[in-house]
Structure formats: structure tokens, C-alpha cells
Image (tube, rainbow, N blue to C red):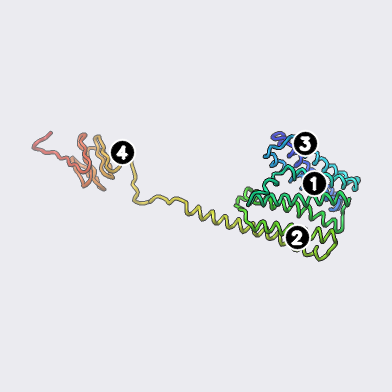
Amino acid sequence: MRFWHRQPSVALLAQAAGAVTALGAALLWLGGLDVPRTLPWLVAFLVLTIAGERLELARVGALAPSAERTFLGCVGAVVTGVVTTLMWPATGSLLLGAGLLALVAWLVVHDVARRLLRSTGLPRFTAACLLAGYTWLGLAGTLWLLAGPVTDGTRYDALVHAVFLGFVMSMIMAHAPVILPAVLRRPLPYHPALAVAAWLLHLSLALRVVIGDLRDVRGAWQLGGALNIAAVLLFVLTAASASVTATRRASAVARTTTPRRPAGPGAAAASSGAADSGAAAAGPGAAGSGAAAAGPGAAGSGAAAAGPGAAGSGAAAASSGSAETGAATVSVDPRNPR
């Protein structure tokens, strides 16, 4: 409620609905319901959470109010389908599939990914991963819409991997270079090898799901599964390597640009009543180059002499208000007192 009072929005409603479905899945599982029956709840949790985040970013492009209402209707259809699967699995699967397809259509139309696809570097990589993930989510919605309740067999395998590997993992790859540096406080610059891992993931997933599961080709299913693992590991290793390299480069640059400390011993220290080299001091005292003397005596360079009058090399001696820069000698002549 605190978040709602701070910023009420449709995106927050979608994410809250995702959190409720996650809680429902946990309670159903604790109550003895098996994982295939709780799968719609788990899928809704991830899909609605990610969709809410994408809605927030879609507002950058001046989203129309009608678009947000349509988005909210898609979220309502997904939640209604999820709840209905408990009582009427066939009807619930039909509603869930239709809701997911409507949500995918909304994301494809309103997400900034379509415009970023024409850019280069990280924006293009992010857009490609997003659109590929929407494609896999659309396949999952189609399976629920056409095949009805799916709790085992090759279609169940296709459904699980289309959502959790095709959609969710693709979203992780798309957001990793942006989210992980903020969370881990380590740089993660984009590297083309990240795109290689993403392409390997989607091609191997197509081999596993489209050919292996939907056409029941066991060899394609096995090879696709092995390549799925290789793609995820390649992405993790590439991201870790890029992060370590960027951290080392940043440390090297910081060392070369750090200013040196000033010299320690031998530095000139100023005390009360001291003046810089070449300055003249007035008053009953005297100041010389690099030294200061106070009182009716005199100060020399590096030495002080006290008495009725004294002068040292490079010092200034003052007597009753007389001063001279460089070297000054003041004496008292007993034959001509003043």
C-alpha cells in the first residue's frame, strides 16, 4: 500500500498481481498440488512482473491512456485464466492462452524494442532479446490456447522451456548489462560475445522445442538441450570476463590519473607573524627571507641572534621600527648616541 500511495499506476497493479500469483503458487504447492497444476500461477508471476516493468519503460514514448487501459485488460485476462485453471482447467487454459497472446501483442506494439532494433550495440542487443522473448511467450500462449491443459509429455516440456528459458532467460540477457552493474556495483560493458550466446540460446531452443518436442524428434531434443546449457554458460562466462576486464581497466586509469602528493620534509611552514620570501615586515620585529623574528632583536637566515642588535646573512633586523629587505645591520654607536 505504501508504494501505491507513493505512485499509483497500472504497472504497479500488474506487478502486484504477479506477486499475488506467486503467493498463490506457493500456497497451492504447500497444499499438495503438483507443479504441473501450479505452472500457470508460476508463469503469471514472472510474466506479469516483467510486463509491468516494460510498461514503465514504454511510458518514455508518451504512451496514450487508452494503451494503459488495454494493458490492464490483458493483465485481467491472464489472472482470470490462471484462477480458472483450478476449477475448469480447459476453460482456464483457453483464457490464459488468449490473455498471454493479447499481452504479447500489446508489448510488441507499444514497447520501445521495435524502434531500438534499428540502432547498434547494446540498444540493438537489448531490443533483439526482448522481441525474441515475446515470440517464445506467444508460442506458450498458443500452446495453451490450442492444446488446452498441458501437464505432461512433449508439449509440457515445450511449454516450460518456451516460458522459462525462451522468455525469462531472454529478458535476463536483455537487461543484464543495465541492471547488474547497478545491483553488483561492477561494470558490465556490452560485448559482441553476449549476442553470440543469445543467438545460440534461441537457435538451440528452436531445435529443442519446435523440432524435438512438437515434432517428436528425440535427437533434436537432446542436442537442443545440451546447446541450451552451453548457451547459458557462455553468457555467464562472457559477462563475468567482460566485467573483470572493465574493472581492471578502470582501476588502471584511476591509478594513472591520481595526483601525486606534495613533498613532505623540507616544505616551508608558516607560523604566526611569518612572511613569504622577499616580503618586508614592519613593526618592532623583523622578518627575513624564509625566517621570522619578533622583538627588538634580529633574525638571520636559519639562525636567530638576540641582543642589543645583531644581523645575520640574508636576514632582516629591525630596531625601533626600521626594516630593510635583504640584509640590514643596526648598531648602537656609543660616541654618537641617537
Q: Is residue 221 above or below residue 2?
A: below
Front label number (1 vs 3)? 3
Tell me the quarter of the picture where residue 243 sits. Answer: bottom right
Residue kind at label 4, given as amino acid type: Gly
Of residues 51 and 258, the one drawn nearer to the viewer in this rendering? 51
Q: Are marks 3 and 4 in contact (CB under 8 Å)?
A: no
Q: Quadrant of the N terminus?
A: top right
Q: Which mark is residue 273?
A: 4
Residue kind at label 2, given as amino acid type: Ser
- How far, Cα to Cα, is label 1 from label 3? 19 Å
Which of the two discs, 3 and 2, labels the residue nearer the N terminus?
3
Q: Quadrant of the C terminus?
A: top left
Q: Which residue is mark 1?
A: 44
Q: Which residue is mark 2?
A: 204
Front label number (4 vs 1)? 1
Front label number (1 vs 2)? 2
Does dot 4 land on a helix, a strand or a loop?
A: loop
- How far, Cα to Cα, is label 4 from label 1? 78 Å
Q: Which mark is residue 100?
A: none
Q: Is residue 153 above or below residue 278?
A: below
Which of the two discs, 4 and 1, labels the residue nearer the N terminus?
1
Q: Residue at x 44, y 50 (%)?
A: 259
Residue kind at label 3, given as amino acid type: Arg
Q: Give the x, y percent position of residue 49.
A: 75, 45
Q: Which mark is residue 69?
A: 3
Residue kind at label 1, given as amino acid type: Ala
- How far, Cα to Cα, is label 3 from label 2? 37 Å
In the picture as drawn, the residue positioned furthest to the front comes out as 118
Q: Give the x, y percent position of residue 121.
A: 63, 52
- How far, Cα to Cα, is label 3 from label 4? 77 Å
